[in-house]
Image: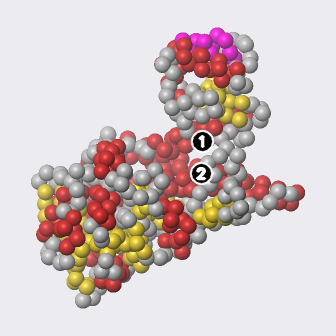
Amino acid sequence: MIRCSIIIPVYGRPALVRQCLDVLLDGLSDDVDAEVIAVDDASDAETERTLASYAPRVRVLRHLVNLGFAAACNDGAQLASNEQLVFLNTDTVPCPGWLEALVRYAEVHGEAAAVGAKLLYLNGTVQHAGVVICQDHQPRHIYVGFPADHPAVNKSRRFQIITAACALVRREDFDRAGGFDVAFQNGLEDVDLCLRFNEMGREVHYCHESVLYHLESASRRSRRTVHDNLRLYQTKWAPRVKPDDLDYYAADGLLRVVYDASYPLKLGVSPLLAVLDDRREHEVDWLVNIRSRQVRELQKEVARLTIVLGEMQTGGGAWPHVGGGRVEAAAFVHPPASPGLDVASPHPAPVPEAGPVEGVLRERLVDTHRRLLDEDMEIEANIRRLQERLAAASGDGLAKHTRMFVPNQYFGYEADVRAVQERVRSELPRDAVIAVVSKGDDELLRLDCRQAWHFPANDEGEYAGYYPADSAEAIDRLEALRARGADFLLFPPCARWWLEHYTEFARYLETRYRIVVHEETCLIVSLNDRAHAT
């Protein structure tokens, strides 16, 4: 008989709580003796009523004041009666057998103080398969976005860190470590705890056979900024941790080093893992990379909309998913697969070598990816419209459901970037050199093979890292860039504020150079034409 205590920290989101508890309780087998403890961290009355409806199967500990994730988990652990503590977020959906796999793995690996599960996004790609320390000494989830059946995420093994969204922790080790550090507020508590386990001489493991779906970061709003938690982590751990991400990439065959008699070495990198951060990188590599980022952002927004709309559903039993370019309601029994073509597929067609036939194949591949990106744009536009409706509803009598919903800025910005790229494609020659007013976003420099520099820029044409102090400095920097060969100055929508802030600079442009495009999409100034604005 498997015995454990499942501790669920709760802060609002009653529909999410109901979904998690229903799936959890219905899925417990006869071989499992699990007490379920929900710690209500000063939620609203609706959440309190929701939790009360599960008595006596769920024990509820209620905080009168919101204390945060760490304190809720610590208090739940004190109330627990079993040796095995399983911490579980309300934004998870357990799959059959998840708990048995987790507990049995811990029984076999007595050296492990904590064991984490495989967590998936709703589209079936990986959200958590272990956490690594990267070369900048920051912790990050490894293999995010990989397919769930990839060999690299289907091997149970040791890591320095696992997420506490679903984690089994031995009570003895938890008590010895002092529990979660309440100095962290809804972020990096699990990282800190795992690193303390390591210092104690105990291990942290990942169990790939325990699988859950995870609506990442949907269950709780942080009361402290990410910056504050990161600063605390950096002070406490960054100087001491050992980067290990490259070790896993090499062990999993995704990073290879070929040694020769002399340098430079030859590196082999799987396209699943990385693309070159170089302006000369192949266009297909770039398209696959940007597509992966878009899919991740789309998936996060789908999760957020799922929560908001789920709370607005009567009874909380229906959950929306994206399908066919629109948001539909569907009973959430199993997380929906991606509709149509697998947009998250990490296996793009191989890029052939150059040659007459191969060149045609490459063009077709690029065109295929562009058409897929267009489909994503349609989905993004529909999500954006839905966001705007929810934002309007939050000020129109539905605030208690939407909690003053604010649209994600990602989709509007991405649409602006694509509009700028299309305008440049149609208006400027391919041999043009373009200075782009930006804040260092390299996507704004991808202008169909046209050479582009950040403005303001350093001597290498890279973003300088700061804005001009005044209009005089902006003018000097512009003329220096023009002397180096810049033909046009481009203002994307996110940089139009320059024209209001640097008024003398704006007047200088109007009186000295010709404006070739002046619309909401962008403002483009020709630095070679000494004419009045048109």
Which residue type does callout 2 highlight?
Ile
Q: Residue at x 68, y 54 (%)?
A: 264
Q: Where does label 2 land, which residue?
A: 290
Judging from the image, what secondary structure is the residue with disc 2 in?
helix
* Nearer to me, 292 or 193: 193
From the viewer's perspective, is residue 280 above or below residue 10?
Answer: above
Pinpoint residue 4: horizontal percent, then vertical percent: 22, 78
* Nearer to me, 243 or 6: 243
Q: Is residue 96 visible?
A: yes
Q: CA distance from mark 2 to mark 1?
A: 9 Å
Q: Residue 443: which disc?
A: 1
Pinpoint residue 95: horizontal percent, then vertical percent: 38, 76
Please provide the residue range marked out in magenta.
Answer: 504-515
Q: Is residue 389 visible?
A: no
Pinpoint residue 195: horizontal percent, then vertical percent: 32, 61
From the viewer's perspective, is residue 339 above or below residue 466?
Answer: below
Total numbered circles: 2
